[in-house]
Image: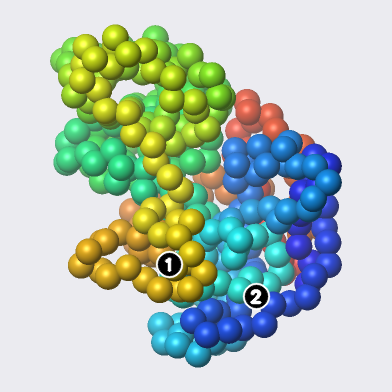
Amino acid sequence: MKKIVAQHKQARITEEEIPNVKPNYILVKTMYSAISPGTEIMMLEASGEQKFAMGYNAMGVVVECGEGITDVQKGELVACYGAPYVHHAEYLLVPKTLYAKVPNHVDPKEVALSGLGAIAIHALRIADLQFGETAVVVGLGVLGQIIAKIANAAAYNVIACDISKERAGMLNEPNIHAFSTLEEMEEEINKQTNGNGADAVLLCAGGKRSPLTGKCLNWIRNKGKVVIVGDVEPDFPRNQMFAKEAQILISRAGGPGRYDKVYEQQAIDYPYGHIRWTEGRNIAEYVRLVSEERINVKPLIQEVIRFQDAPAAYEELRDKQSPVLTKIINYME
C-alpha cells in the first residue's frame, strides 16, 4: 500500500505492506483523509533523517473485522482518528476505540475531518461553558472554524476573529460574529457582555510566543477561562491572571484516551458511567452533528486532490492567509 511520510522537511509517498487485522481492530480501506495544516506542517518542518507518517483524520470502508468487533461489519463506512493508527495511507488498522460508524446518507468527505471534529469538541468540553455563555474563538484555521460552528450549534454566544479577512468571512453564519481585527472583536465582546467580558477564550492561533497570551486576559470576565488549543506557549502575565482569578486551561487532542496505550493500543474503552466523553465518543458526536446537519462543514472542503498530488499540497497550505484551510485526499482516483 502507499503512504505519505515526512523526511528532510519534505512530504513523499512510500510503499509499505498492508497491515494484518488483529483482535479488537478493524482494517479500513481509506476513501478520504484530511490534511490538518497546523499540526502536519509543523511536523514536516521538524522532520529529519528518520521517516514518520503524516496525518490523523480519515474515513473509509471496513474490509475486515478482527475478533471482538461487534459494532461494525465488513462493507460499512467508518470515520477514524489518531496517529499512529490513522495516517494518509491506503489501508488503516484501527482499534475499536478510535472509530465511529458513518450513516450512508452522509457525505464521506465531511467525516474525513472527524479527528479535527473530535479535537474541536474536546476543546469546548474543556471550556465547560453553559447554555447562553459567550465563547471567543481566536484563529480561524480549519480547527477554529469547526470550534466556532459547534459552539454556535450548542447555542453559545460566539465571537470569532482572524487577521485574514477571507477566513473571518468564511464564518458567514447566523448568530456568529466574526471579525478580522482585534479592535472590532473587542468592541463586540463589550457590547455582547455589557462590558463584563467573555466567559471563555479559545486560542486556536499558532505561534510559540504569541502576543495574544497577554491580550486575551483583557477579554474575559472575572473568573473567566482561556483554553489553549493551538501551539501556543502558556506565557501569561501573572498580574492579569491574579486580578481576574483567571483559569488557564490546555486542551489535549481529541479527549480522554488520547496517548493512553490501554485505551488506544489495547482497545480497552473507559467505562461509560465514569468517563462519559472519550476521544472515540467525541468522534461519534462529530459524525452525529454532521449527519443531522447541526453544523455545516461544506465551506471548509474547497479542494479535493488525488493521493499522488498530496505531497505538493503541503506547500500551498503553508500560506496562513489562504482561504483554503485543508485539502481532502481522494484515494479512489
* Residue 263 circle label: 1
Q: In the rendered image, which quarter contains the N terminus?
A: bottom right
Residue at 41% from the left image edge and 87% from the top image edge: 70
Nearer-the-camera pick, 139 or 24: 24
Label 2 packing within 10 angstroms: few (<14), some (14-19), many (20+)? many
Residue at 66% from the left image edge and 37% from the top image edge: 42
Nearer-the-camera pick, 249 or 113: 249
Residue 302: percent from the left, percent from the top?
62, 45
Q: Nearer the viewer, mark 2 or mark 1?
A: 1
- Give the Cα distance between marks 2 and 1: 23 Å
Residue 189: percent from the left, percent from the top?
27, 18
Asked if residue 178 shows in the view, the reply is yes
Residue 278: percent from the left, percent from the top?
35, 60
Q: In this view, does 332 lie above or below 239?
A: below
* Residue 29 circle label: 2
Q: In the rendered image, which quarter contains the C terminus?
A: bottom right
Asked if residue 78 shows in the view, the reply is no
Label 1 packing within 10 angstroms: few (<14), some (14-19), many (20+)? many
Q: In this view, does 192 lie above or below 121?
A: above
Q: What residue type is labelled 2?
A: Lys
Mark 1, secondary structure of its residue: loop
Mark 2, secondary structure of its residue: strand
